Image (tube, rainbow, N blue to C red):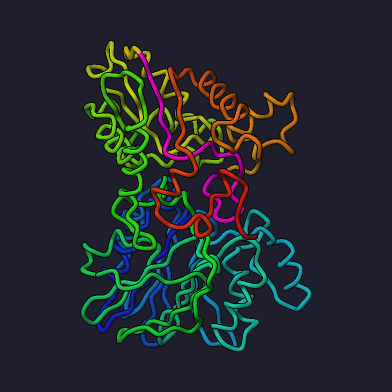
Amino acid sequence: MGGFFGTISKSACITDLFYGTDYNSHLGTRRGGLATCYKGTFNRSIHNLENSYFRNSFEKGLDKFKGNSGIGVISDTDPQPIFMHTHLGKFAIVTVAKVNNIKELENYLLKKGSHFSELSSGGINQTELIALLINEGNSFAEGIENVYNKIKGSCSLLLLTKEAIIAARDKYGRTPVLIGKKEGSYAVSSENAGFPNLDFELDYNVGPGEIIRLTADGYAQLRRPNKKMQICSFLWVYYGYPVSTYENINVDFVRYACGLNMGKNDPTGVDYVSGIPDSGIGMALGYAEGKGIPYRRAIVKYTPTWPRSFTPANQTVRDLVAKMKLIPNKKLLEGKRVIFCDDSIVRGTQLRDNVNILYKFGAKEAHMRVCCPPILFSCPFIGFSASKSPLELIARRTIRELENGEDEETPDKYASTNTEQYRNLVECIRKKLSITTLKFNTLEDLVKAIGLPKECICTHCYDNSGYF
């Protein structure tokens, strides 16, 4: 996915920029980048983060970043920020985007006489493509509107100019953009988790398609927000940091509410509840309260150095990550019946290995409760998984088996809770993963826990709905 952070101040900005960008590190694993503007001159640094922390990569070189304004990014796509010198002026740009029609737009721009800096992979940088689409406008606002109209997928972005930062949220608001303020300074970020420690207060949620221009003295609207919104529900389930809020709805509050409701309605007899770190913990605490049984830390995350287990493209690496990053507590597991709460089951890689280890360490029963419904469709909007094919999803592989090798026309009928097809799907996944019992949260209860109208939340990966 990815996350960005920008700040503009009446004093030097690099400390806030550095730490603010770092507070988005949970949103991506591939690359990090910073850019500042000082007396009309831009400075930039980009580092690979696949084998290093953002802080370790950038801390030694911070002295070169002068100026009172800057933008940073944690990216799961191509190198960012990039610089542009155009008829609109000089600017740096970072994006959180997924462009599904990138080849079509590449050909369109080439025919118009544009050119690209080709990557070593042979492809092009999608942030550069977005910048070229912006350059087709007679103003930054007009250019960003052009991006909204031409790309298929999603795009939120920050532009750093000599005078200001321009922030734009995806036209359907699939990814959030939040503005914070403190004396003499403003910040804009994908997450507000870092605002308190940097003394910023959340001041404004940028609306879907809204464009905002920020200076050290305040901010102004360049484009009004759209009426339709489809913010990604998976932000509350998995991606969001527990203290973050989107649309003024706290991440951990939603996870807790999901667990509380499921726990109240679960008659399964067990000894205690445990969360799969980190994103399963909030749900597990709610589950324990709802069910009226203890919470125990039967599994502990060793270190944050391990990336998200479904992010690496190589299956062997995913298997290794899933095994290494979590350590079970044998003393708590021996002879116990345990409900484990997790955010989701994507490929099943992590859960399959974890369950085997739980039994190895003496667990008598391992029950699994999942914060969201089965994931049946690959995400075309933000790419929360590295999956290129729906059949990498354990739910779709299982449907294919149930349908004797055919699944293209059938996933929709497995999305409705309490149908025979749904029950068969859950039971088959349970058997594949050797779980004592398996229950997913319903889509209706997830939407209720988030608290927004269903039409304002993107639930495409569960039920194939959403605006395109």
Viewport quadrant of the C terminus: bottom right
Q: Within the magenta stretch, is there residue 368?
A: yes
Which secondary structure is most common in the magenta stretch? Answer: loop
Residue stretch rendered in magenta on the structure = 365-385
Provide residue 434's location: percent of width, then percent of height.
Answer: 48, 17
Q: Vertical placement of 461 versus 336: above or below?
A: below
Image coords of residue 67 (percent x, y): 32, 80
What residue do we see at 71% from left, 67% from top? Answer: 105
Count of number-bearing discs: 0
In the rendered structure, the answer to whether residue 383 lies left or right of residue 184 reads: right
Residue placed at 43% from the left, 60% from the top? 3
Nearest the eye: 291 or 361: 291
Task: Relative to 18, say whether 235 is above or below.
Answer: above
Q: Nearer the viewer, residue 289 or 14?
A: 289
For image coordinates 53% across by 73% down, the residue present is 226
**Residue 427 image-quadrant placement:** top right
Q: Nearer the viewer, residue 411 or 146?
A: 411
> Please, is residue 176 above or below residue 164 in the view?
above
Where is residue 432? Give x, y as percent. 54, 20
At horizontal 22% and vertical 17% (from top left) the residue drawn is 331
Residue situated furthest right in the rendering: 111
Q: Nearer the viewer, residue 103 or 370?
A: 370
Give the vertical position of 210 relative to 290 (above or below): below
Q: Position of residue 175 (x, y in %)?
A: 48, 61
Which quadrant would residue 8 be assigned to in this image? bottom left
